[in-house]
Image: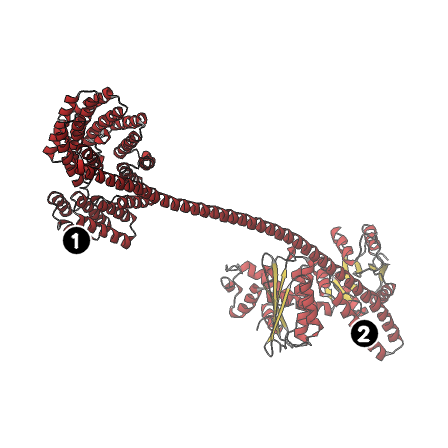
Amino acid sequence: MENKIRILIADDHQLVIQGIVCSLKEVGDFDVVTTNNCDDAFQLIKSNQNTNPFQLLFTDLSFDNTTEDALLDGGEELIKAIKNNDINIKIGVITGHTETNRVYNVISNLNPNAYLLKSKCDATEIGFAIQKMLVNDYYYTHEIHQKIMRRNIIQIQMDDVAIQILKELPNHPKIANLEGVIKKGDGSFLKLRSIETKLGNLRSDLNANNNTDLVLKAKELGIID
Amino acid sequence: MYKKIIFITLFINFSIFSQNKDFEKKPDSINVLLKKYKETNNSILPKRAFFLAEKTQIDSLIRKTYIDFGLKSYYNKDLNNLSLSNQKLLNLYSKNKDSIALAKHYHYKALFYRIQYKTDSLFYYYHKSKNISILLKDSLSVARRLLSMARIQERERDYLGSEISTIEGLLYIEPLNEKVYTLYLYNNLGLVLSELGRQKEARKNYLKCFEINKSNLNKKVKEISNLDYYTNAGLSYFRENNHREAIAFYKKGLAFDSLEYKYPIRYQSLLENLASSNYKLGKHKEALKGYKTALSSREKHNYLYEQSISHTILAGYYFKERETQKAIFHSKKGIKLAKQTNNSNRTLINLNLLSQLIKGEKGRQYLQEYIQLNDSLYKRERTLKNQFAKIRYETEKKDKENAGLKEENTQKQLLLESEKQQKTIGWLIAGTSILFIGFGANVVSSRRKKILFEAKLQQIEAREKERQQIAKSLHDEVAGDIRMLHLKLAKTNQTEEAKSLDVIKENVRNLSHQLSSESFDKVSFKDQIINLISDFFEIDFRIKAEKIDTVDWQNINNAIKRTLFLTIRESIQNAKKHAAAKNIILSFSETKNAVFLTISDNGKGFNVADKKTGIGLKNMKERIEEINGVFSIKSELEKGTNIDIEIPKHGK
């Protein structure tokens, strides 16, 4: 029992909780605790923190049963509270919310290790997500991943410097040669260090393995012609 | 009989005085001509001078030349040249409207009649000249003309008229602090008063002359005036029968050094007056001696007019002494000279004497002549007096009328001005009140607008909440129920139904997303826009947001941002769905008071005028106009659509 991975599930719908519990049983042998509100979830995490801590948390984002006197009125608040208390627990979001703003807000600000959608989720996906989460990696379900990718593309598109780098990259065998070519908005040249940082970000945003891959992907995605 | 023994020589005085000023700032040639003319009375000289002056085309010089030569012509009794100068001055006036020339013209016309002894015309033209000088504000000239007029009136025995003219002249001259003409005017006043029997008052004026004369700088005038003072003061005592005082004054005058040589006329007058006083005191022999000395002096200088006086006095003397032959002799001589010099008074006296001295038919003839002349003189005197009065009255009436008109005008002007002022004040008040009202209205309306705007914003927010509520319900309740149903169906293997339910679920979810406010307070507007774009983004449907960072979104009202967001979403949907556009550009900008957004696509466009433009566009327009924004859309078929939006930041 001591070695079992402890998982806490928070959702306001009993049916969903049951579904997840069912799926988890298919994935492996976990010590699963469930709750239908955020305040209880946070209390469970905190009280077990030193004795028998949870390794994973799956939570919904919106809780309809939230009452007026609830301290944490949703998944976002719960995640925030955990992050603020510096509790070492990997968080996965299982929700129906696909609105880009909400997704973006959760991913960029709360940085959960997984983002799953109830409608598409099954045991296989949960298992895959758990694997990633346990090694502190990230897993976003396909739809969410696409969203984030598109968003990155848009952002890169709006970024003049990024466009310049992507365009100039194939013309220069060495990255160092880009120094003195890339201009900032105010007309000054970008330092090599900044160029390298930017390239790193671009690679991660577009899931590129290396710079050649980055340019190829950028072309593929229509960021550059 | 002895009343007429003084001689008024002042006119000659001032002529001497005025000669001194002539030679100033004039080309020598003209000066030389003037001098020559004065000496030789050559009547061709003025014409030459006029020609020279006219050649210079300097109007002031031309005028001066006319004036100088006109005066000389008068002294030379050169009637033709006087009339020429006169005509030239009139021409100058009609050419330049030079009133100084006109005043001189009338003055010389007066002098022209003076030479001809036409007293009424003389008086008339002096009067006209004076009036022009009044208009010119040339007080000295006015005073001089009034003095001349007063003298004419005095000579014609219109003493009251003369007094008035003199006093008027004094009114004009006193502010000038001028000596010579002030002196003459006081002297004339004294003479008139003396004639009117007011001897004390007369002497006061003579004394004033004497006082003024003390500071007189013109030596000749000073000497003459002093002599006149003694003569006139003596005469006033004589008239009061105070002969000792009179004699004292005459003697003072006669004590003047080389009097006979320097001022023979004064000398003769003083001598004669002294003799008259002596006669009154019974010193008949001394008197006769005086009369005779005066006569011989006059004969020596060939003063005809004065000789007639002397002869008349002597005739009277001998008449009283009953020396008839001598009386007749002097009387006849006196009458002859008097007639020669137009001295009708002396003529009259002598006619009277002769009518008494000569008996019989001849005596009667003299008497008849006397009566006739007396009558005619009386008539003339009366008509002249009347004429003087008439001339003065008429001009005064005119003056009064003018003054009345002027006053009326000024009153009218004042009235107009005050009306104008009142109007201006009225307008100002009206303007200020309008401004006030406008300001107030503006404040009120802007406040109302602000309140309205805020109410609208609140409305939008309330609507937003409602949307969220509906979205939430849709998402959590409807979608949840559908999910459950879906699970049930899946379990009972009703795949077809489950699939169609899936479609419904998807639709509900989309609807929910559309309605949802999408966590506005948690994501920046820029990120929201990026998210929105990324929702629609495809390889062949590119959306680019330009200059989104130029707007300080944090300080922009949420309702505005919400409206912009919804508008952008609607536009993108339209561009994708209806216009089949491949590119959309969103361009943002901001000024102090407004946010601007331009959305342009390269779709197939549509006819904006078409009424069936759909509910989406209408909603967009309404949403923007609701917060006082401006929405304008331009579309060209096969080229694309362009939407311009301007939203005021503070509802104005």
> Mark 2, residues whose alpha carbon is within 10 Å: few (<14), some, or many (≥20)?
some
Do we see residue A205 in this rendering?
A: yes
Q: As rendered, which of B16 and A142 lies closer to the eye?
A: B16
B270 relative to B414 in the view: left or right? left
Q: Name the amino acid type tagged 1.
A: Phe
Q: Give me the chain letter of mark 2.
A: B
Mark 1 nearby-residue class (10 Å; few <14, some 14–19, many ≥20): few
Mark 1 and mark 2 lie on one chain; the one further toward the N terminus is: 1
Q: Residue B51 carries which label?
A: 1
B125 or B514, nearer to the observer = B125
Residue at 43% over, 46% down:
B406
- Picture quadrant where residue A128 is located: bottom right
Q: Is residue B532 left or right of residue B302?
A: right
Q: Position of residue A26 (x, y in %)?
A: 84, 68
Q: In this view, does B123 lie to the left or right of B81?
A: right
Task: From the top left corner, tell me how far across and down residue B69 is, in percent.
Answer: 18, 46
Q: Do labels 1 and 2 share a chain?
A: yes
Please state if A158 lies on the left or on the right of B387 as rendered: right
Q: Which numbered disc covers residue B504?
A: 2
Q: Nearer the viewer, residue A112 or B347?
A: B347
Task: Give me the residue at 32% from left, 42% from top.
Answer: B388
